Image (cartoon, rainbow, N blue to C red):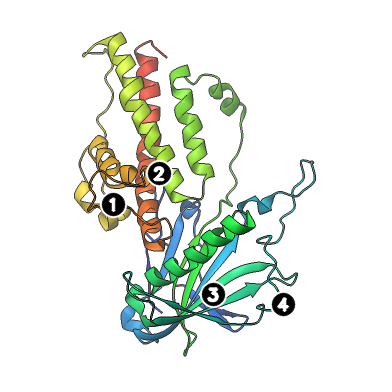
Amino acid sequence: MEVNQSAEVRNWTIRRSGPQGEARVEEHQGQKFFSHKAPAEFEGRRFHIELARKEAEFATKGRFRVSYSIYNPFAVFDDLLTIWSEVRQATNIKVSKEIAEETLEFLYSVDDQKPSKVAGVSFGISSGGFLERLIIFLDGDVENMLDVSDHIAANILDFLSLTKQTPIDVRAVSMSDVDSRQPVQQILLVPYRRSVELSKDDISQAFAVPKALIPLLRLLREARNSTNPYYQLLCLFRIYEGLKKKIRADNFKKLGRNPAYPKPKRRVPENDFTRQYFQRWIGRPFEEFLDWVEHNFRDSIAHLVRKDPSARVPDPSSTKHALMTDRVNSMQISMLQVMILDEWEFMKKNGIA
């Protein structure tokens, strides 16, 4: 089976944009899913697997099943005030027996037209009766199926968060053809699993960070801790703002236009990842790309209403836009890591660290 893999690389030293080998199709509780071991460089990124169209065993139009694996982000903690943690059930929403085995039907519309299409909604439930998956059944074209199901799922999850006063997030999305049960595509968040070693040098170096750079490191850690691509993007872009408007401006005042040891001029490198997603930026300065991020992502994510009324504000429920934002974040993390270390070295060499 040929698979189109568009997972994001977060480290430019890994010169590939997708893992090697083929995805397997496995069956679980009567449903088929892709199975692929993601390598370490995909940790913390959204991983997208899609059945290549020429090998597809499903119709491009028909009935599709879109499953959203949901969870409570606070489920990693237990309710005891100890340092030990137990993983609880995926959510704390208990599904009533009345609808536990039902497929509910609702009318929905596309492009704000009068509701005329029928969507089926059912639930994946744990052995304890708690909600684990929200499953949407739709008839239509595979190309826009995910956009429609995202909108329906988000409406339900938004309302549950409001009325049940509980956090709910989506960990993975899986689409399959109902008739053949063949998986069509799968998007999931890859966890961090690799081990890293803590040394004495790590502790001593932690106290050598220039005071001016400490807020940037705090924001970088906050960004890495978040599984939400929009919040992550805002944290990352704030690092760039701090570097550009505060730290570099202060250093310029101290050293003038011609420091003894200037910073290297960084440009977007050419590798598998940049060739696949950001080809037009290859060879251009980091700053140009980050300014583009400001006008095309940061502004629209930070503000509910844009200055240009005709410009569309991105829908946080969109799986496709989350993937796009995730790719931009991969670029930002790689750039900002380099820029922070460059600034630190610049400050040390010029005696202002």
CA–CA distance in space, label 3 to label 1: 35 Å
Which label belongs to residue 135? 3
The numbered mark, 4 or 2, whose residue comes first in the sequence reads 4
Circle 4: residue type: Lys
Which label belongs to residue 97? 4
Name the residue at 74% across, 48% down.
Answer: 85
On the image, which quarter does residue 347 sit in?
top left
**Mark closer to the observer (3, 1):** 3
Q: Are marks 3 and 2 in contact (CB under 8 Å)?
A: no
CA–CA distance in space, label 4 to label 2: 41 Å
On the image, which quarter does residue 237 sit in?
top left
Q: Residues within 10 Å of mark 4 (few under 14, many from 20)?
A: few
Q: Quadrant of the N terminus?
A: bottom left
The numbered mark, 3 or 2, whose residue comes first in the sequence reads 3
CA–CA distance in space, label 3 to label 2: 29 Å
In this rendering, the answer to whether 216 lies above or below 207 is below
